[in-house]
Image (cartoon, helix red, strand yellow):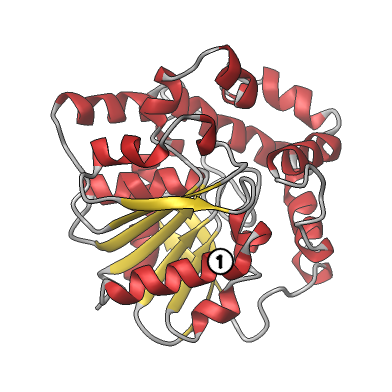
Amino acid sequence: MVKTLPDLFPGFESHFVETAQGPIFCRTGGTGPALLLVHGYPQSHVIWHKIAAGLAKSFTLVMPDLPGYGQSVIPPLSADHAAYSKRTMAQTMVEVMSHLGHEQFGAVGHDRGGRVVYRMALDMPDRISSAAVLDILPTFDYWNHLDRTFALKIYHWAFLAQPAPFPENMIAADPIPFLEHKLASWSAAKDLSPFSEGALQHTRAWFSDPVRIAASCEDYRAGAHIDYDHDAEDRRANRTINPPFLALWGEQGIAASIEDPLSIWQTWCPHAKGKAIKGGHFLPEESPREITQEILEFFSLQKIP
């Protein structure tokens, strides 16, 4: 599969890094302080292909596929969904960074990857020098803010979190139309124009695998159960995010469906900064120039080791 797909990261290296969960695929490249870029649903590390070259001039980039996605290990499903919890995924990402020689690093996460990044900042603040999330709000807040309008916007949260194997069987019956509907409907243009054909080829390839479809559903089952519980525990204990923190969201993205996203993030991180960016949900592909500039400015100011 890999050999027939276009190389969207010329000059970058490919790795399979062994972790407690199994091998994690990642691309690395660039010079400077380490910066971890974590993708979301329904994508892989390929989401960063439009901004990687620009960031690599200032940072050593590590762009993994999350467990179950792309080319990474597919952990088994379980009753407690723990293998797909953002706490477990965060630990796995830290393992990857340690293996590559990065004991402290900056981290950027989009969508599900953003949930991994903020969990990492809560659980392992000594490893994260600074963190940014793209077009999300905390899992706890999404579930607690569900009303008629927002439920229609994120209907997939409840659908994908249904017990196995219902949602995965439904999607696997005709996966590519489902995939392309999600990509188009979450973009500002409401079509596939923000996505290069090469990126779509990569995404169609792994999303056609029924086992990986099931893994991505398990990710959302974790979000509805164990991830929510972890967030709720932090809220009860008044734990907050300590590293410098940036939240960016699309003007027509998902997070903008809730009024004043920054104020919600500041309940988790009083010093959080943030703003809206022109575009929809997939900011690294819809607004690559703006996102590159925001990342360069924020992480350069933080003086990552």
The image quarter in which residue 53 lies: bottom right
Q: Nearer the viewer, residue 233 or 19?
A: 233
- Residue in view at x 68 percent, y 40 percent: 186
- Residue in view at x 75 percent, y 57 percent: 194
Q: On the image, numbered disc 1 is attached to which residue?
A: 290
Residue 33: horizontal and vertical position, in percent?
34, 80
Q: Identify whether 79 is placed above or below 172.
A: above
- Residue in view at x 85 percent, y 36 percent: 177
Q: Is residue 118 left or right of residue 133?
A: left
Q: Nearer the viewer, residue 252 or 285?
A: 252
- Residue in view at x 79 percent, y 37 percent: 181
Residue 252: horizontal and vertical position, in percent?
62, 42
Q: Is residue 20 left or right of residue 125?
A: right
What amino acid type is highlighted by mark number 1?
Answer: Glu
Residue 215: horizontal and vertical position, in percent?
59, 37
Q: Is residue 46 left or right of residue 105?
A: right
The image quarter in which residue 208 lies: top right
- Say which element carries label 1: helix
Q: Identify whether 102 is placed above or below 268.
A: below
